[in-house]
Image (spheres, rainbow, N blue to C red):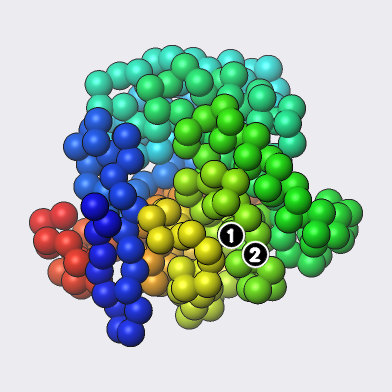
Amino acid sequence: RRLTWEKKDSVFVAPVPTKHDLATGRDPARVKIFDTTLRDGEQSPGASLTGEEKLILAKQLAKLGVDIIEAGFPIASVGDFEAVKTIAQTVGCRDDPPIICGLSRARKPDIDRCWEAVKHASFPRIHTFIATSDLHMEYKLKKTPDEVLEATTEMVSYARSLCEDVEFSAEDATRSDPEFLYKVYSRAIAAGATTLNVPDTVGYTTPDEYGALIRGIRENVEGIENLTISLHGHNDLGLAVANFLSGVENGARQIETTINGIGERAGNAAMEEIVMALQVRRQYYSSKLHLAPSK
């Protein structure tokens, strides 16, 4: 059954219940909390974590009830691989478990290493990404747009051959050409992605811009009707939480946060700030999401 709600002249379609939703009794129309403290948060200066410290934090995040824990970047080091694997084997197999996610570039060795780490969880996820802005494609990837499209199809399809739950990120999405972005996301969906992440990689966007981008993706990407749109952003302009709230109003249903907003440069969107914004203003946001205020 497709769950729908309206906003102005558009109809947004909520994701159908996932296996994780059904197993844990979580509302599929909720705003999902994806915590990346153990991955992106660790990029904050001085915040490097041992495997034991990651496990302690992962247990506490599970107690908080977060939906997804991004436990690390398994190919980055042997230590990070082992930490993600241990979290998958323990926290990922507890009662009412979170999804355990690992990050990988859109490369087979990354994806293989990620899968080897997360596959032990009850609900594993591979999160793969490729850059889509003109700057990143030309100077970092040294790839043409067509090559990025082909890599998206190939690598998302490969990730999906290993794991049912695949999140795809278009790195530097907020500085990418929207029309190209729609093509990339459409390719990712056709290849099997189940969540689409829209990163504000360098903390560049503003709330109105971000909301419009999310709305454009919802209206122009092929096959997006039952997928989750996710938000990822940095606080370089002090706007990360405001950007997320705008994204939620325009159809996003997953937010990628860190505890206390720690992360590279000026940090990430702070979990406690956006959760409390949604909670304190629940009458307002429940009406936007068409949920009962108690939710």
Q: Amino acid at mark 1?
A: Ser
Report the front residue among 150 and 282. 150
Q: Label 1: state its secondary structure.
A: helix
Residues at discs 1 and 2 in contact (Cβ within 8 Å): yes
Q: Residue at x 48, y 49 (%)?
A: 195
- Considering the image in quadrants, where does the C terminus appear? bottom left
Q: Residue at x 53, y 46 (%)?
A: 193
Rendered location of residue 112, percent (x, y): 66, 25
Rendered location of residue 38, percent (x, y): 51, 34
* Disc 2 target residue: 183
**Residue 100 falls in which quadrant of the image?**
top left
- How far apart are the alpha carbons under marks 1 and 2? 5 Å
Is residue 96 left or right of 41 when viewed as pictured?
left
Q: Amino acid at mark 2?
A: Lys
Rendered location of residue 30, percent (x, y): 27, 53
Q: Which mark is residue 186?
A: 1
Residue 86 appears in view: yes
